[in-house]
Amino acid sequence: MMNYFNSIKQNDALKEALYEIPASIFFVIFYSFLIGPIIGPEGTAIKLLIGAALFALVYFIETNVFFPKVDVHIIPIISYIESLRRNDISIFLYRLPGQFAGAVLAILMIWTTIAPESKSLYSFEYFQLDPFLTALFTGFIAQFAYLLHFFVMVRMKIASSVLRFFIFSAGLGVLFFIVTQFGKITLLNPFGFLAISILNGHQGHIQTIFLGVVIHIVVPMVFISGTHFFLNRVDRIIEIND
């Protein structure tokens, strides 16, 4: 057992990934009691704008609180983007379980201690309107998230990490506003939605679950990967011409 914990201490990537658990707990709780109630089931444009601003603020505060120790991602697509950028898939694979565990623990805490009467904090749907259109929209949102991360967190020449985090968080707030205008896309809080769905005992047909996995996991990863490799190719061409 001691050897197991010593191996964790010696693995920096795994040690950093453990911080995703408390970060996700706080994020889902803030989302549930601060952002969700303001938006409501039928959010007006003003409510969605306020919710988007709060989403950006919560993400900015959390990333800066943890930043002196570790760079937390909270949102799985951010971990996937970082894994591509650093050419290290372990970043994504290590952080994913922590993000999921944090979301489940947050929902359990809400049910058992904070608001035991609440059993439907989220309304989860695998897709709205048309599966193809939902997948396409989700893919473009994921692509926008990659471009936002690429130009703000990688390319932008700003010495202050706090300012970069602020601009990036504001960009995520814009994405949140676009997503909530369209419908209940899970991309910016996937494990919060999934946790409440699992703990509520929601079950779907195998075909519906398969479509959900394709729409909310496979398609965003494909769009992000395609954008990443396209930009890398462009960079190589520019370097060769120079």
Image (cartoon, rainbow, N blue to C red):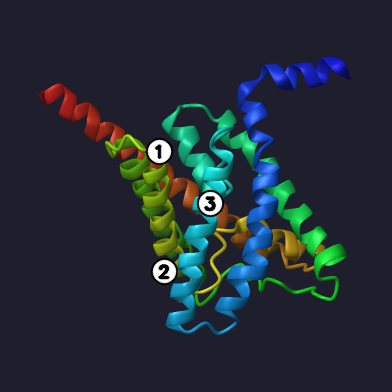
Q: Secondary structure at mark 2?
A: helix
Circle 2: residue type:
Ile
* Image quadrant where one finds the C terminus: top left
Circle 1: residue type:
Ser
Instruction: Please tell me how crowded label 2 is: few (under 14), some (14-19), or many (20+) other residues with Cα within 10 Å.
Output: some
Q: Earlier along the polypeptide chain: callout 2 or callout 3? A: 3
Please give the name of the residue rendered at 81% of the width and 19% of the height, measured from the top-left corner: 4
Q: CA distance from mark 1 to mark 2?
A: 26 Å
Near-viewer residue (45 or 242): 45
- Coordinates of residue 11 in the picture (x, y in percent): 66, 20
Residue of label 1: 161
Q: CA distance from mark 2 to mark 3?
A: 22 Å
Badge count: 3
- Coordinates of residue 41 in the picture (x, y in percent): 60, 82
Q: Secondary structure at mark 1?
A: helix
- Coordinates of residue 3 in the picture (x, y in percent): 83, 14
Q: Nearer the viewer, mark 1 or mark 2?
A: 1
Circle 3: residue type:
Ile
Please give the name of the residue rendered at 74% of the width and 65% of the height, measured from the top-left corner: 197
Q: Secondary structure at mark 3?
A: helix
Please give the name of the residue rendered at 62% of the width and 64% of the height, measured from the top-left corner: 31
Residue of label 2: 178
Please give the name of the residue rendered at 57% of the width and 62% of the height, measured from the top-left corner: 186
- Coordinates of residue 119 in the picture (x, y in percent): 80, 73
238 with respect to 152 (left or right): left
Where residue 67 sits, quadrant-wise, is: top right
Q: Earlier along the polypeptide chain: callout 3 or callout 1? A: 3
Residue of label 3: 61
- Residue 97 — which label? none
Q: Nearer the viewer, mark 2 or mark 3?
A: 3
Q: Does residue 182 appear in the picture of this structure? A: no
Q: Earlier along the polypeptide chain: callout 1 or callout 2? A: 1
